[in-house]
Image: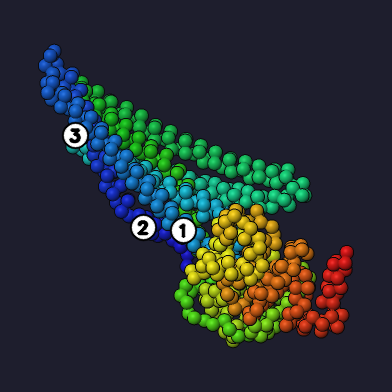
Amino acid sequence: MKTNMKKTMLHYLMKVKYYILIGTILMPLSIYFKIQSPIVVGRILNELLKEGVGIVNYPEFWKDVKLFLYYLLLFAVLKFASELILAYGANKSIVYIQNDLFKKVLRFPVSYFDKEPAGKISSRVGNDPSQIKDFFETAISYIIVPSLTILAILYKIVVLEPRLLIPLILPMPILAIGNYIYAKIMRDASFKVRQYVSEINSTFNETIGTIDVIRSFNGKDKKKKEFDNLNESAFKEDRRLSMLAAYLGFNFSETMKNLTLSLVIIYFGIGTLRGEDFANVGMIYIFINYTTQFFDNINNTMMSIGTFQRSMAAAEHAFSMFNVDLPLEDLTDNGVDLAGDVEFKDVDFSYVEGEQVLHNLSVKVGEGQSVGIVGRTGAGKSSLMNLLFRFYDPDRGEITIGGNDICKMSLRDLRKNMSIVIQDPFLFMGTIETNVSLNTPGIDANMVEDALIKVGASDFVSKLENGIRTTVTEKGMTYSLGERQLISFARALVHNPKILVLDEATASIDSETESLIQNAIKTIQEGRTTFIIAHRLSTIMNCDKIIVLDKGRIVEEGKHEELLKLNGIYNEMWLKSLEEKCS
């Protein structure tokens, strides 16, 4: 279901409605005192400029001076309080937006990340909401408040001298049309700027993540040129946006203000010549002040349209993520038991339409059995496991566990009984304990320590000053690859899965660490249905079954000794591994 941007914005406004309510109540009060101030000054001027000498009514004069200062103080206090409350509400709303966006991203299908660069996603979750904050602040402080001020000024003019409405109302149609055109231009330009910002973030994130590859191929200059071009394009678009805001926003309303002030002065000049009562210095001051305030508020509104439209463009950019279709993910525990055989039945699969990766694949793995999966690069090994975890769904055929179609299970039920250990183990910032437990309820420190002992990681962990509470930095780079892999094995073990997947878990391990890893594998696969995708065939030679994939098809299947006798792909790979070991 498509998200309506206006409804979504209203939804988040309602979450901070009390802040908005209090802020918008205080704002009109501050406006009242601001509008009253010129009238008091007008009285003071008339009192001082009365004909004759020494006839100033000082008690009234000082009373008005005190009243003026009192109005100024109340205006300042109320304006400060309202803006502070509204700013707090705006910041609170951004917290809600970012939390919801992050929660949504965590549920995205893996296929979404294949199409969208990480930089663009992080920009929408991190940068765009901060721009949306300007919407909440700008909409109230620079659009609603000026509008109320304008209405208050018009009311006061009607009370004091209705005929002076004419020079104020005359330019209104021109201003309205100008505002409409300006808003449309600014929104289109703002959206382009947001797109450039996303591309810049995407390029930057990609560069940081692949810096070693870029350097090894002497690609620094090429990458820098690419980034410079992108940055220059963003700068030009942003400069165009700023110029539009400056020329269309300020100059247009400033011209209208000067024209209207001229008409007001002419009107008072004619009134003075005719000797009319309203044409006094105090009244002239009041109307010049009101006219200036009137157009300054219009100018503030027009100048804020740029910010407002940038916020709307950012909102459209960020809220588009709410439109991503999610797979079935029932958050309730339906108690589905993943016991039983795992079977792939006539499965076809493709990441991109028309480019099939798996062809009519069928294989059955008994409960508690271990199966090794081997094949050349691109044979479809990892794709098989992507389907088992339902990172993707098959194009045709079905995958069942205990006779239950996994596509009809909720992801929560499916994945809570499965664990995976990948080739490049990833550690999160935190501690060794949190990296093993993943803060899962029910997993305590004793269980973490027990898992580390079973996989052979306790030797190096016990030597650390704080043991399992030792801090882990970003990606766990202070630990060796073997140590990170052992922590990953402990993570898989402590969650007690019924189905375990080891995806090239020993591919990058040195021979010295391999024996530790092999023992860890034996430990964690006991009593579990285990899928082992292997680069090193020594890892899978004792599996109950080995399947050999080639171009997305099962070409050989059997035990280690049986496959060697076939003199096929597996035998070829085995002989090659022996040669590498000898060399």
Quarter of the image for residue 282 reads top left
Return the residue at label 1. 99
Quarter of the image for residue 327 reads bottom right
Q: Position of residue 101 (x, y in %)?
A: 49, 59
The residue sitting at 42% across, 59% down in the picture is: 8
Distance, label 2 to label 1, CA atoms, is 13 Å
Which numbered dot is residue 199?
Answer: none
Circle 1 sits in a helix, a strand or a loop, which is it? helix
Which of the two residues, 180 or 296, is positioned nearer the viewer here? 296
The answer to whether mark 2 and mark 1 are in CB contact below 8 A is no
Q: Is residue 364 above or below residue 349?
A: below
Distance, label 1 to label 3, CA atoms, is 52 Å
Q: Earlier in the sequence, mark 2 or mark 3?
A: 2
Q: Is residue 553 above or below residue 120?
A: below
Circle 3 sits in a helix, a strand or a loop, which is it? helix
- Locate the C terminus and report the quarter of the image it occupies: bottom right
The residue sitting at 62% across, 56% down in the picture is: 464
Q: Position of residue 185 (x, y in %)?
A: 48, 45
Amino acid at circle 1: Asn
Return the residue at label 3. 160
Return the residue at label 2. 15
